[in-house]
Image (cartoon, rainbow, N blue to C red):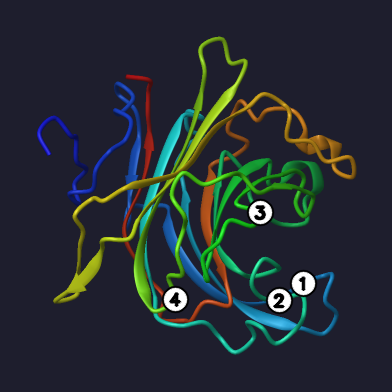
């Protein structure tokens, strides 16, 4: 791995750190986890459990970011598949990594404003790239995969998502990776850094949603200090490892 830069956990960096930039690691101030009961507005009377893992940065960060996390997903809760709208390629079906956004609550114009990189629990590519603004309004797209994302229920999986503005701020370049090589030994994560590119693209304003036109423009700045890894229907014992959020720069 000569020439490859590693973080404090020994995890490969795709982009270099921003000079004098901020790096947040798991267990830093601002790191948190919650397990809460949640209902979908579109599914009356149905409740599910949500595992939310997040960074709440001490300041608004540079929008050029690289987020990394490994997750052990022991199993899914019984709510998964218990309703036609809850399950594979539907609601609560994977790990949704949200970058450049604010909080995800009913605050209308103050909420969300994020890019979402979605990884299905059962594998597959449905709705794998999304934009949300304001909260609950989405533009959802299924982008072609360079490497097919697998089923990861009962396994450890690494996730790495990147947003970076191009020169002149006319496009937002984005990447989604995954690392299926990880395992847990004596309570610690061990990985060979086998990062596979899932997809790579540019947002030039082409990801449009007629019902949610606020999602159309490119999201050039960070909307708030918050970023999250959201997993509906994931077991309470779902564990995060080696999480980081770094301000990055072009090589």
Point out the frontmost of discs 3 and 1: 3
Between the residue at mark 1 and the residue at mark 2, the CA separation in whole angstroms equals: 10 Å
Q: Earlier in the sequence, mark 3 or mark 1?
A: 1
Point out the frontmost of discs 1 and 2: 2
Crowding at dot 3, Cα within 10 Å, few <14 / some 14-19 / many 20+, comes out as: some
Q: According to the image, label 4 marks what residue?
A: 153
Between the residue at mark 3 and the residue at mark 4, the CA separation in whole angstroms equals: 19 Å
Q: Check residue 127 in the rendering and tell me which mark sits there, or answer none.
A: 3
Q: According to the image, label 2 marks what residue?
A: 86
Considering only vertical position in the picture, is 231 above or below 101?
A: below
Considering only vertical position in the picture, is 232 above or below 57?
A: below
Q: Secondary structure at mark 1?
A: loop
Left or right: where does residue 5 sit relative to residue 111?
Answer: left
Q: Secondary structure at mark 4?
A: loop
Left or right: where does residue 247 sit relative to residue 207?
Answer: left
Q: Earlier in the sequence, mark 3 or mark 4?
A: 3
- Are circles 3 and 2 on residues that touch, CB within 8 Å? no
- Are circles 3 and 1 on residues that touch, CB within 8 Å? no
Q: Earlier in the sequence, mark 3 or mark 2?
A: 2
Q: Earlier in the sequence, mark 4 or mark 1?
A: 1
Residue drawn at 68 percent across, 28 percent down: 218
Q: According to the image, label 1 marks what residue?
A: 40
Q: Earlier in the sequence, mark 1 or mark 2?
A: 1
Between the residue at mark 4 and the residue at mark 1, the CA separation in whole angstroms equals: 23 Å
Between the residue at mark 3 and the residue at mark 2, the CA separation in whole angstroms equals: 14 Å
The x and y percentages for residue 250 are 38, 20
Q: Quadrant of the C terminus?
A: top left
- Are circles 2 and 4 on residues that touch, CB within 8 Å? no
Q: Residue furthest top?
A: 168
Q: Quadrant of residue 182?
A: bottom left
Left or right: where does residue 236 sit relative to residue 192?
Answer: right
């Amino acid at each position: 791995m000569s020439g490859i830069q590693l973080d404090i956990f020994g995890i490969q960096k795709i982009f270099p750190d921003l000079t004098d930039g901020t790096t947040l690691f798991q267990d830093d101030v601002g790191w948190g986890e919650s397990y809460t009961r949640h209902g979908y507005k579109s599914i009356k009377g149905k409740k599910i459990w949500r595992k939310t893992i997040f960074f709440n940065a001490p300041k608004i960060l540079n929008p050029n970011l690289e987020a990394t996390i490994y997750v052990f997903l022991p199993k899914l809760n019984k709510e998964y598949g218990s309703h036609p709208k809850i399950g594979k390629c539907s609601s609560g079906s994977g790990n949704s990594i949200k970058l450049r956004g604010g909080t995800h609550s009913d605050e209308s114009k103050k909420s969300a404003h994020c890019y979402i990189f979605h990884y299905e629990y059962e594998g597959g590519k449905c709705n794998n790239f999304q934009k949300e603004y304001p909260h609950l309004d989405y533009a959802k797209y299924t982008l072609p995969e360079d490497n097919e994302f697998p089923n990861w229920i009962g396994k450890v999986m690494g996730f790495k998502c990147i947003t970076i503005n191009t020169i002149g701020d006319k496009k937002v370049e984005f990447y989604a990776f995954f690392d299926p090589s990880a395992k847990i030994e004596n309570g610690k994560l061990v990985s060979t850094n086998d990062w596979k590119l899932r997809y790579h693209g540019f947002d030039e304003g082409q990801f449009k949603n007629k019902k949610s036109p606020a999602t159309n423009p490119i999201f050039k700045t960070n909307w708030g200090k918050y970023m999250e890894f959201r997993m509906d229907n994931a077991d309470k014992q779902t564990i995060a490892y080696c999480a980081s959020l770094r301000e990055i720069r072009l090589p």
